[in-house]
Amino acid sequence: MNLELLFNTYGYWIIFIGTVIDHSGIPLFIVFAGVLQSKNDGFLLPAYLACLLALELTDILALLIGKYFKYKVKFETINKNNYSKYYKSYFTGIISKILNTGAEFYNKSKGIVYILNKWLPAVGKYLPVFIGYQEEKIFKQFLILIIGNILYITFFYFIGYFFGLSIQSYSKMFSFVSVIIFLFVYFVSVKLLNNSKKIGD
């Protein structure tokens, strides 16, 4: 299979779908888009937009899921008979506990949820669920999430860009060491962020 032909045909779809399903906290497909940028003279706007649209899609889905559960709980509260059935359900009981815990975290750490949610490995893309669950209107919150996504994409896009340049200008060993240092700094930063949040709580 010709990988170059495959990417030339489906490249932006690969970036888009990969960014949607990636939950590592280190967006490999955004970094990959940056690497591609390093090999081109002009700005690859479609590659950047593919990354942004992927994150916006996940935000919209997360906000709507949170809004769905918000209205479901509100409806069940009004209908007392259904309310007891709702919380007697094992599945919905667990979901309710998660949502209430997440809503409490959201109230204490709105800056993290809006700007830094994508940086948190595994759970970051799900944090907007708590925004939808907690807020009555979500359009303003969605616009703030866009700002956070742009910062996130731009950072990792340029990481990929400079990584791509290092591959072209220096040895592959240098590039490998650069990636190891970056990963170390990134995970230490995430750990320090989590520790500071625990101390704040």
Image: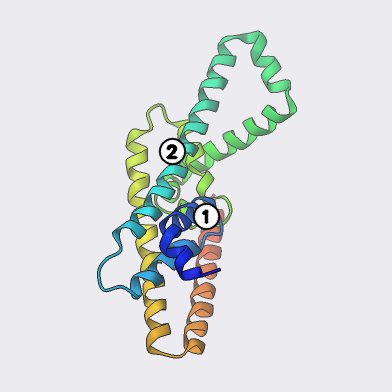
As shown in the figure, which amino acid type bears the numbered disc 2? Ile
**Residue ID for mark 2:** 60
Residue 133, visible in the rendered structure: no
Report x, y in % for residue 185. Answer: 50, 73
- Residue depicted at 47% across the width and 44% down the height: 58
Please tell me whether mark 2 sits on a helix, a strand or a loop. helix
Crowd tier of the residue under label 2, counting other residues whose Cα lies within 10 Å: few below 14, some 14–19, many 20 or above: some
Q: In which quarter of the image is residue 170?
A: bottom left
**Above or below, 83 relative to 169:** above
Query: In screen coordinates, is 136 left or right of 70?
Result: left
Assign a secondary structure to mark 1.
helix
Specify few, some or many for label 1: CA neighbours under 10 Å numbering under 14, 14-19, or 20 or more: few
Q: Give whichever of 18, 152 is nearer the camera.
A: 18
Front disc: 2 or 1: 2
Residue beneath the point at 55% across and 58% down: 194
Question: From the viewer's perspective, is 34 left or right of 128?
Answer: left
Residue 184 % position (x, y)? 54, 75
Q: Are marks 2 and 1 in contact (CB under 8 Å)?
A: no
Percent position of residue 159, x then y: 40, 71
Q: Earlier in the sequence, mark 2 or mark 1?
A: 2
Q: Residue at x 52, y 55 (%)?
A: 197
Tell me if 67 is positioned left or right of 155 in this view: right
Q: In this view, does 51 lie above or below 181?
A: above
Q: Which amino acid does label 1 sit on?
A: Lys
Using the rendered image of the protein, determine whether residue 71 is visible from the camera's viewpoint. yes
Q: What mark, if any, has residue 197 been given in the picture?
A: 1
Q: Which numbered marker is on residue 124?
A: none
